Image (cartoon, rainbow, N blue to C red):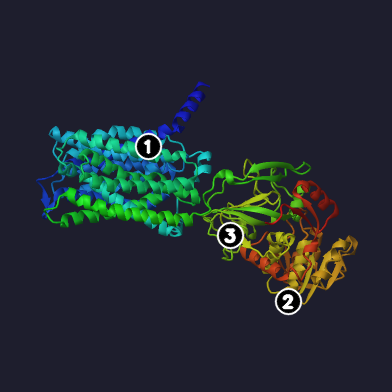
Amino acid sequence: MQQTESSARLKRIFSNPAWALVAAFGTYFCMYGFRKPYTAATYADASFLGINYKILLIIAQTIGYVIAKWVGIKIVSEIKHNQRIKAILGLILFAELMLLLFGIVPRPWNIVCLLLNGLPLGVIFGLVLGFLEGRKNTEFLIAGLCASFIVSDGVSKSVGALLLGYGVSENWMPFFAGLVFLVPTLIFIAMLACVPLPSPTDIAARSAREPMKAEDRWHFFWKYAPGLIGIIAVYLFVTLLRSVRADFAVELWAGLGYHQTPALFTQSELLVSFGVIIVNGAVVLILNHYKAFRFSLFICMAGFAILLASVFGLSHGLGTFSFMVMLGLGVYLPYVAIHTIVFERLIAITREKANVGFLMYIVDSVGYTGYIGLMFLRYAAPSGYSILNIYLKICIVLGIVSGLIVLFCFWYFKIKLKGMNHKQTNFPQGKAAVFNGAGLPFEFIDRQVPFIKPGEILVKNLYTTLCGSDIHTYCGRRIEPAQVVLGHEIVGEILWIDPAHPGKDFNGNVVTVGDRITWSIFSVPADVTAPRVDMPQKSDQLFKYGHALAIGDDVFNGGLADYCVLHANTAMLKISTEIPIPVAATISCAHATVTGALRVAGDLSGKKVLIFGAGLLGLSCVAMCKEAGASWIGLIDNDETRLHWGQKFAADESYAFPAADNLDTLPWPDADFVFDMTGVPQAMKVGLDSLALGGIAIWIGAVFPEKPVPVDAQKVVRRLLQIRGLHNYNYEDFVNATAFIENNYLKYPFEALIEKEYPLDEVAEAFTFATASKPVRVGIKISDPA
């Protein structure tokens, strides 16, 4: 008991945002101890090929850092949660090893060691970031993380300067600085390992942050390319400004008349980090993602205004220390806003399959690549120019250009994200009829529609028809788990399309809110390969509407409910509003299954066809065989009231099924094709006996337990007969069924086959009627079209 309480207490501690903040801050703060201390040295007495040695060191490490950023786009976006800690440990230790070699290898060849030092360190940020994104308090956490590299930049230089003051040589100072930071680094990494995954509440508020594949990355980038390119440009410019300010801090302070003092670096950066954390971290209080996103762009604009004001103020009496603090605020406000808010809220708005690490590593790659170019331009500049003078000119140009780009981003995302500034509470409350088992009453439950996941569509159900399999389940002849929202013959209207959805139906037609659609009975995840191309309905991880458990908020997955949430990668089709709603509902099971049966059968042109079962599948099969060119069609059933529909659906003859003692002489001619819709063993045997030489039997009705069908194997072999089975249908069948109804709903009286209609509240009465009276179909009217 005591151990359980202790475990629960630790879990609460680890789940506290402060724990994650300290762990992430500490880890990345200490990482700078392996990266930045060398910049505290001037290396004034060294050069290589006439180039300043320190500039070469900065360029070398930055090249390694840039390579890591470009490679990191793939690594950070794809890495799984349980792999991050091992990766961080390995990368830190490799970086320290390179610093050891930097001290051993003589100049200038030790430049290569600093390049290799930058390689692992360039990936650390994305790995740490992965522990913080996708949470309700992400802005606060990442603002704290970003403060680490503002503060640590000054602290690491101070440590480097102190070591130099104690007589450590410039070559060995980076390695010993790394040793100073090594133990605290390991402690903070251990803390980071205890940070739990985002909670379900976090995921509902911000969306799941899943590992991305290459196609996911390209999809997201191209979908928002103009705005992302604008953000990339802004980030490139602030990276240039920030990196020059950080790496040439000694020279900038000297240009302002200050002597090198370790405390100076830390003091200015503490003030900057405090201001940046307050402004960016406070955005966590803005719950509306769209407003928070726009506010993040405003922060960027404010930063560039402060930047320009600081340069203007320097020449008009502003104190030099105040200038460096204002300059830091102007640079770091947009820099940190992009880290903390822009991408985090963009993903939360769009609900795309994406993660912040992926987007950050795109902008970082471009930013650091640009910084390398700036280093070469600095070397090419006239020798009379000081670092400070060049930097001030760059601030003016980039501050103005960046402000204009931010204005463009305001305009672009206002248009692109129109209609996406929703909250979870905007989704409606709905009712569902839950089937709890044969003989038990339906349970009506009210739930708010859960937050839509990436790639999903929210549909308002208009109408559901009770399929034969629904009735078999209701009667206990077909076993389904309890707590199911039945109904898979559905038609509805789109209420919401998640931005990650391509916005097109299976035929490539653009779909929008308000469109009337129907969808396949099943959904297969995009990363699952079907066992055969023509059998997606038999894929692993298959989800079936009207067959899934209704647990918690996940109840809107069937037809007997106000709404249905379509999973990503569900085949759906936009349909004409001219088609009667009850007829449209039957497309996604009955008619699609029949088109599948005809596909399995092959060419029917000029052939004789027998169809066993005069329910909706049988009558649909009669009409489809007629349209396929069959020369003669016979319809067989033991229900005289159903057989009278045969002629209306173009059957040439209708037959009552013979009595059990009168099956030796059948009243109908042999057929080339026999379709069995009944699933009754005796009917299936008689169907085989009714085949002509080389005939084919297609069985689709046997979807519930029954006695085995007695088959005369010798007769099958000698008469070259075939038996072909079909369960459900594939995408081609679904498309063909929709086209068939669109072309023939006026030609055949499909609407009349829905013999009685009930509201959702009377679903129990509807099943009772369907069981007792055996109509062709019973309809459930869910709601009126908009």
Residue type at tag 1? Ile
Residue 266's quadrant in the figure? top left
Image point 44% across, 31% down: which residue? 14
Q: Is residue 596 above or below residue 758?
A: below
Q: Position of residue 198 (x, y in %)?
A: 48, 39
Q: Position of residue 654 (x, y in %)?
A: 85, 69
Q: Would residue 327 appear left or right of 769 to someone viewing this image?
A: left
User: 307 or 463: nearer the eye?
Assistant: 307
Quarter of the image with the C terminus in it? bottom right
Residue lying farthest to the front in this orientation? 316
Mark 1 neighbour class, 10 Å CA radius: few under 14, some 14 to 19, many 20 or more: few
User: 36 or 72: nearer the eye?
Assistant: 36
Residue corresponding to mark 1: 278
Image point 27% across, 42% down: which residue? 326
Residue type at tag 3? Thr
Number of numbered discs on residues = 3
Residue corresponding to mark 2: 629
User: 510 or 30: nearer the eye?
Assistant: 510
Residue type at tag 2? Gly
Residue corresponding to mark 3: 512
